[in-house]
């Protein structure tokens, strides 16, 4: 190892520092006793206690989790259908256009998605009286639009790796198309479906931009609460909340990657 | 130019599987053109031919995972393709894929049980255990496919296909994914098991030796049509075309002239019964080239190579551009440069 340059190592260290130092600082200050976020006094878990007593944040968290779970579930179901449909129409002309259209929400600026959905909901509300008012339902619908795009991409990737002879083998062994789907195709797709669900769930949980467009009175998701409270001055409670969210997100990502890896091993 | 060749298929009364006039096109490409074959109950039929000749397409159509454009298939007196299209799950036809297609998320037992769902549980378990024992898979019962070797994959695929007692077993190049050494053993084991069970088998192969030795009859295909069908000796000893002859053996080809039922070549005169006068080619098997004889023609030894069991000698002969090969289990003791007389054994020569 003599004469090995330290340059790549320092670049690596800098890169990771860039990514993680802000998060580490945030976590460290969540254990700060001082009311000021930038001045360290001494270690305490006081803000965690206050966080748990804060009803506004509790409600917002509960709403966020419900919206995320509902939108992730619908996204995954629609994404699975989309992936199968696109495999079916492999020979159809113009298939490329459909593929691009289905992933557009991934590349469209969120501001645009949010604004266009807001306009749609307002128009629909006036035209047919539904949705009567904006709130949890409209946020969920908005999150489905981009969650579905991510789910489609993840599930399609896995579906394209599946050996089509497995379904034929199942049919030859007496399985009806439905049983083939339930007993062969679905179990083999399961890792991707779960990973897609976790991805859609996480994306929904941290969305501010789209939610702030399509929300209404009485439906404030957790990111919206955090965002608005920061504008009034940061409370260390937010640090404590952020620390818990980082922990939660890390667990989800770990679970998703473990599932995907298990899917690879089985192949 | 390409007029359809009608190969007359005798349809015996006891035909168990009767495939008639199957055609299938993929876009512009005709994969199968009017293919017919019959198999008796308990017969092992080899479908031979080079890759891309339509063998696998035919197998997929018999299994029902693909549909023909025209033609009928009757199995045990019941029409399963033609006016009706019986779903693959309703045909009771077992198909073993070339890559075996074991379910990666199920263990060996789960794979075998998958095809037994329409039996009551006790019967399904009895059949599963029977299949596991029959193929000696007891120690692998709880393993997943990614933990199995190539030979074990093949055995599991066979167990899975046989467990529901299919009326016909279709095998797509079942031994081509195995090591050479393993292949012969597994093939012998598999075939003797299938004979013991009296299973009707259609087996696809591109290996000429396998085609000759494995089945009761051979159907040789080329470009979506049947070239010749019959027993091993029909095809090997009485090939009806250059393609059929060359599929099973690499010949010495000696151009000559036919006249009055004989062909004159630089290698001498040979019978060419029923051939029209004119140019023709004498096909001589390497083992039908004999050294010695007073009527032989002089040839020069170019190379002499011992390949273990057999000896291969290459000759040059005046008037023949290509060197001639002779293969024999006898040791000639010849050295390169030697001049010897050679002649042909009529049993191993054909005129086309």
Image (cartoon, coloured by chain):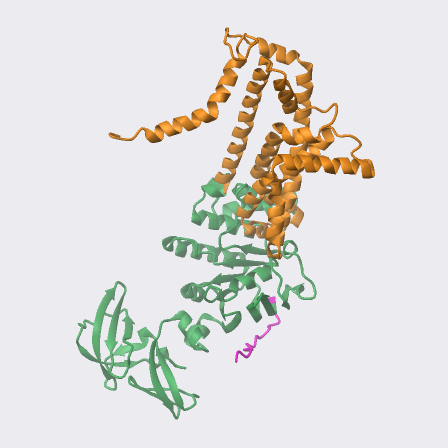
For the stretch drawn in magenta, what is the main secondary structure?
loop
Q: Along the line of sight, which residue is nearer the eye, A170 or B2?
A: B2
Q: Residue furthest bottom?
A: B260
The front one of B133 and A194 is A194
Residue at (53, 64) in percent of width and height: B43
Q: Position of residue A36 (x, y in %)?
A: 55, 10
Q: Position of residue B287 (x, y in %)?
A: 31, 73
Q: Is residue B298 above or below residue A160?
A: below
Query: Residue A58: x and y, percent?
Result: 67, 18
Percent of width and height locating residue B160? 54, 49
Residue B94 visible:
yes
Nearer to me, B166 or B327: B327
Residue A13 figure quarter: top left
Letter of the chain shown orange in the rendering: A
- Whether residue A124 sits left or right of residue B6 in the image: it is right
In this orientation, which residue lies closer to the viewer: A31 or B284?
A: A31
Q: Is residue A30 above or below residue B127?
A: above
- Which chain identifier belongs to the green chain? B
> Relative to B346, is B152 above or below?
above
Residue placed at 66% from the left, 38% from the top? A145
User: Is B16 in the magenta?
Assistant: yes
- Is B125 one of the magenta-colored residues? no
Q: Quadrant of the N terminus of chain A?
A: top left
The span shown in magenta is: B1-18
Q: Is residue A188 visible?
A: no
Q: What residue is at 51 percent from the left and 36 percent from the top?
A: A262
């Amino acid at each position: 190892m003599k004469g090995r340059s330290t340059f790549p190592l320092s670049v690596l260290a800098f890169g990771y520092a860039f990514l993680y130092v802000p998060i580490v600082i945030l976590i460290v200050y969540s254990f700060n006793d001082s009311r000021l976020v930038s001045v360290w006094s001494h270690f305490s878990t006081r803000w965690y206690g206050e966080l748990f007593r804060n009803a506004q944040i509790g409600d917002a968290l509960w709403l966020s989790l419900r919206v995320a779970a509902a939108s992730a579930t619908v996204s995954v179901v629609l994404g699975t259908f989309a992936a199968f449909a696109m495999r079916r129409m492999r020979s159809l002309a113009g298939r490329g256009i459909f593929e691009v259209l289905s992933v557009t929400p991934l590349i469209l600026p969120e501001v645009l998605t949010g604004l266009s959905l807001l306009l749609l909901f307002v128009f629909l509300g006036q035209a047919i009286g539904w949705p009567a008012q904006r709130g949890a339902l409209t946020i969920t619908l908005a999150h489905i639009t981009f969650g579905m795009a991510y789910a489609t991409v993840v599930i399609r990737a896995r579906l394209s790796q599946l050996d089509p002879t497995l379904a034929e083998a199942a049919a030859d062994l007496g399985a009806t198309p439905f049983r083939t789907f339930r007993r062969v195709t679905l179990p083999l797709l399961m890792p991707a479906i779960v990973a897609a669900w976790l991805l859609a769930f996480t994306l929904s949980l941290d969305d501010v931009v789209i939610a702030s467009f399509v929300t209404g009175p009485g439906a404030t998701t957790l990111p919206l609460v955090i965002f608005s409270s920061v504008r009034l001055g940061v409370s260390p409670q937010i640090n404590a909340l952020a620390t818990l969210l980082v922990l939660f997100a890390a667990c989800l990502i770990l679970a998703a990657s473990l599932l995907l890896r298990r899917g690879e091993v089985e192949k | 130019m390409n007029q359809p060749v009608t190969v007359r298929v005798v349809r015996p009364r006891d035909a168990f599987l009767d495939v008639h006039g199957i055609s299938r096109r993929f876009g512009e490409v005709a994969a199968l053109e009017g293919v017919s074959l019959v198999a008796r109950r308990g017969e092992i039929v080899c479908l031979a031919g080079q890759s891309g000749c339509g063998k696998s397409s035919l197998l997929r159509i018999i299994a029902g995972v693909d549909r023909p454009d025209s033609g009928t298939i009757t199995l045990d007196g019941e029409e399963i393709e033609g006016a009706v299209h019986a779903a693959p799950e309703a045909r009771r036809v077992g198909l073993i894929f070339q890559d075996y297609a074991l379910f990666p998320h199920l263990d060996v037992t789960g794979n075998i049980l998958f095809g037994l769902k329409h039996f009551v549980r006790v019967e399904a378990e009895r059949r599963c255990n029977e299949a596991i024992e029959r193929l000696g898979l007891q120690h692998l019962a709880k393993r997943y496919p990614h933990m199995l070797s190539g030979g074990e994959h093949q055995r599991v695929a066979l167990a899975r296909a046989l467990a529901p007692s299919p009326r016909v077993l279709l095998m797509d190049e079942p031994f081509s994914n195995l090591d050479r050494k393993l292949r012969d053993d597994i093939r012998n084991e598999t075939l003797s098991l299938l004979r013991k069970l009296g299973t009707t088998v259609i087996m696809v192969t591109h290996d000429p030796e396998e085609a000759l030795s494995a089945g009761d009859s051979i159907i040789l295909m080329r470009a979506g049509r049947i070239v010749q069908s019959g027993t091993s000796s029909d095809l090997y000893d009485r090939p009806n075309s250059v393609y059929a002859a060359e599929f099973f053996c690499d010949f010495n080809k000696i151009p000559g002239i036919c006249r009055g039922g004989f062909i004159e070549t630089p290698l001498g005169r040979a019978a060419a019964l029923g051939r029209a006068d004119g140019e023709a080619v004498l096909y001589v098997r390497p083992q039908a080239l004999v050294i010695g004889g007073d009527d032989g023609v002089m040839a020069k030894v170019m190379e002499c190579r011992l390949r273990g069991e057999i000896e291969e000698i290459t000759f040059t002969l005046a008037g023949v551009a290509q060197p001639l090969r002779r293969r024999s289990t006898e040791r000639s003791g010849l050295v390169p440069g030697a001049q010897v007389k050679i002649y042909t054994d009529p049993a191993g020569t054909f005129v086309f």
